[in-house]
Image (cartoon, grey):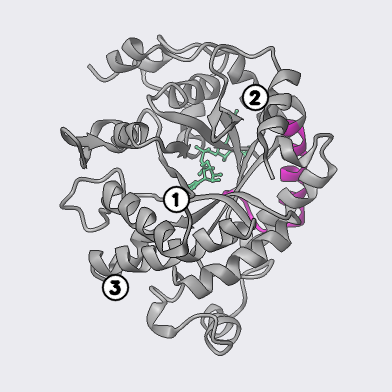
Amino acid sequence: MATREGTWAYRDAHDDFARTFFRRFGDGVASSIGVGTYLGDPTDERDDAYYEAVRTALASGVNVIDTAINYRHQRSERVVGRALSAADIDRSEAVIATKGGFVPFDGRRPADPGAFVKREYIDTGIIDRDDLVGGQHCISPDFLDEQLDRSLDNLDIETIDLYYVHNPETQLAENSREAVYDQLEASFKRLEERAAAGDINHYGVATWEAFRVPTGHEKYLSLPAVVERARAAAKAAGNTATHFRAIQLPFNVFMADAFTVEAHQGPEGQQSALWFAHEAGLDVFTSASIMQGRLAAEIPDSVEAKVEGATRAQRALNFARSAPGVTCSLVGTGSVEHASENVDTGRYEPLGADAFDAVFE
Ligand SMILES: NC(=O)c1ccc[n+]([C@@H]2O[C@H](COP(=O)([O-])OP(=O)(O)OC[C@H]3O[C@@H](n4cnc5c(N)ncnc54)[C@H](OP(=O)(O)O)[C@@H]3O)[C@@H](O)[C@H]2O)c1
């Protein structure tokens, strides 16, 4: 797993980046740019491209790799595992994050997805049919437990540094908010137990809408309520402190709600997800940091003029990692060229707090 010694040694070996490129993550450090592995077809060609991209990134200053068991039908996790073991760094230097929640296929989309899910997960008792939402999403403790084992196997590692419950707001389509919090608490207890057993180092929640929408929104989840459930889970599991450490949510110049929408009750009123997380001591990992590639083609003048970077993609990525409270901005990176360009973003200074705020004035 990522360790204090390993990640600091990695930082020392890559000391030619701009201010605050490496940021505290637990007792170690993480690069503020990470490789994502979501997009792309489930093909051998795309696997090869991710393999080279991940190796390039790990060799050149990025030590955060993000994946999920369902990405490209488990192919992304498997290729991250292969690239990590081939990389010329020690395992203790890299922060490996993955997610469970969406029922994954195996290598390719089956001809009959419903029959696949029934055969592999319902008939085997891994998923109780009542816990399955939309035929594809489940966050029950037993399911996540089983998925975590598969992820360890796919990634070929002994400990996952950060394990996210993936898009829990999906459950709101068929369950009340209170029922979702209850289910999260039960799963968090299992993750606390897996943390105590050394299978994961930290856990968190990755979301698409939950934490950036207003309180009345159908997909809203309260970050303070989730944190409270994690504390209760830690206590129930007999841990002295919770291993809940991070959230993941989209953030880019067009999707800035995590900074602008105040929907989470802090000590002095409603706060944005970014501020609440910051004050609660949580790490924030941004997804869609260049808006799934769109910001490489088009970027608002307010950012174009103010943010450093040689290319649009670099300026967009540099903007995302300038947001207050962000530990790391993830960028889907499926080629060596993009890997090099994205790593080089870290050689430019991020925006200071005042300049960042000014973009929204
Ligand atoms: N709910 C969730 O939990 C959730 C949702 C979405 C994403 N995520 C995570 O966050 C990561 C980042 O989000 P994302 O991949 O959706 O979107 P993104 O990072 O905003 O954009 C990725 C896209 O941008 C392209 N790209 C990357 N670098 C580029 C460059 N320098 N110039 C031009 N184009 C470039 C990529 O192409 P290539 O692939 O060809 O390099 C890919 O098509 C994901 O990979 C995933 O790990 C999590």
Q: How far from the left and from the top, in percent, is residue 183?
A: 36, 68
Nearer-N-terminus badge (1/3): 3
Picture residue at 25% right of the left edge, 31% below the top: 260
Q: Does 46 lie within the magenta span?
A: yes
Q: Quick one: label 2, few (<14), some, or many (20+) residues within 10 Å?
A: many
* In this view, 39 is above or below 16: below
Q: Is residue 280 left or right of residue 292?
A: left
Quadrant in which residue 2 is drawn: top right
Nearer-N-terminus badge (2/1): 1
Q: Does 297 lie within the magenta span?
A: no
Q: CA distance from mark 1 to mark 3?
A: 28 Å
* In this view, 208 is above or below 193: above
Viewer-closest of 328 and 40: 328
Q: How far from the left and from the top, in percent, is residue 140?
A: 44, 72
Viewer-closest of 80 and 45: 80
**Residue at mark 1:** 242
Q: CA distance from mark 2 to mark 3?
A: 41 Å
**Residue at mark 2:** 343
Residue type at mark 1: give it.
Answer: Thr
Q: Nearer the viewer, mark 2 or mark 1?
A: 1
Picture residue at 34% right of the left edge, 50% below the top: 227
Ligand 1: quadrant of the figure: top right
Label 2 secondary element: helix
Nearer-N-terminus badge (2/3): 3
> Quick check: marks 1 and 3 in contact, CB under 8 Å?
no
Residue type at mark 3: give it.
Answer: Glu
Q: Is residue 245 left or right of residue 36?
A: left
Q: How far from the left and from the top, in percent, is residue 78?
A: 72, 56
Q: How far from the left and from the top, in percent, is residue 289?
A: 47, 34
Q: Is residue 320 left or right of residue 197?
A: left
Q: Quick one: label 3, few (<14), some, or many (20+) residues within 10 Å?
A: some
User: Magenta segment range?
Assistant: 38-58
